[in-house]
Amino acid sequence: MFALALPSSAQNAVDQHNVVWNSPSKDSSGSMPLGNGDIGLNVWVEENGDLVFYIGKTDAWSESVRLLKLGRVRVRFSPNPFDAGQPFRQTLKLSTGEILIAGGKPGRR
């Protein structure tokens, strides 16, 4: 297995360009991409608080040469930390290749 470790100074430079959203998305058109070159995700939190993601694979082609999504996963939380009107933050961390999602009032996240 191969892993790339960036020096601290390079991580800080890359993290200056992280993508940050302060509100949930309406649908998949507001998704953040995440992947490793073989498997990919489109991740978003809907306005109702559901965490949703599509799963794709680089060799999943249709007969009409279209890259397909292989599945959709929906996660519902109870209690819902992403209720309307609550603080929300979704961050695509470029240096580590991860998406961090935080919601709810401080102390109840």
Image (cartoon, rainbow, N blue to C red):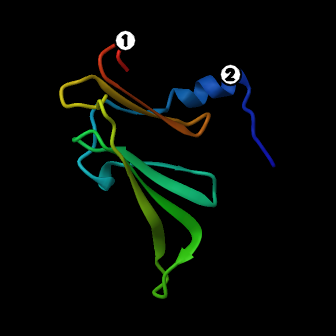
Dot 1 corresponds to which residue? 107
- Residue 60's x, y, as percent? 55, 74
Residue ID at (33%, 37%): 77
- Please state which of the two labelled residues, at mark 1 or mark 2, is closer to the viewer: 1
Q: Is residue 80 toward the left or the right of residue 11 in the image?
A: left
In this view, which residue lies farthest toward the bottom? 63
- Residue 37's x, y, as percent? 63, 57
Amino acid identity at mark 1: Gly
Quarter of image, res 24: top left
Q: Is residue 15 toward the left or the right of residue 32 in the image?
A: right
89 is higher (above) or lower (below) than 38? above
- Residue 61's x, y, as percent? 53, 78
71 is higher (above) or lower (below) than 43? below
Amino acid identity at mark 2: Ser
- Residue 106's x, y, as percent? 34, 13
Which secondary structure lies at badge 1? loop
In this view of the protein, which residue sits in the foreground, 4 or 46? 46
In this view of the protein, which residue sits in the foreground, 54 or 23? 54
In this view, which residue lies farthest toward the front? 78
**Marks 1 and 2, how far apart in space?**
31 Å
Residue ID at (29%, 16%): 105
Q: Is residue 97 toward the left or the right of residue 33 in the image?
A: right
Quarter of image, res 79: top left
Which secondary structure lies at badge 2? helix
Marker disc for residue 9: 2
Marker disc for residue 66: none
Quadrant assignment for the C terminus? top left
In this view, which residue lies farthest toward the left? 85
Q: Residues within 10 Å of mark 2 (few under 14, many from 20)?
A: few
Residue ID at (29%, 32%): 80
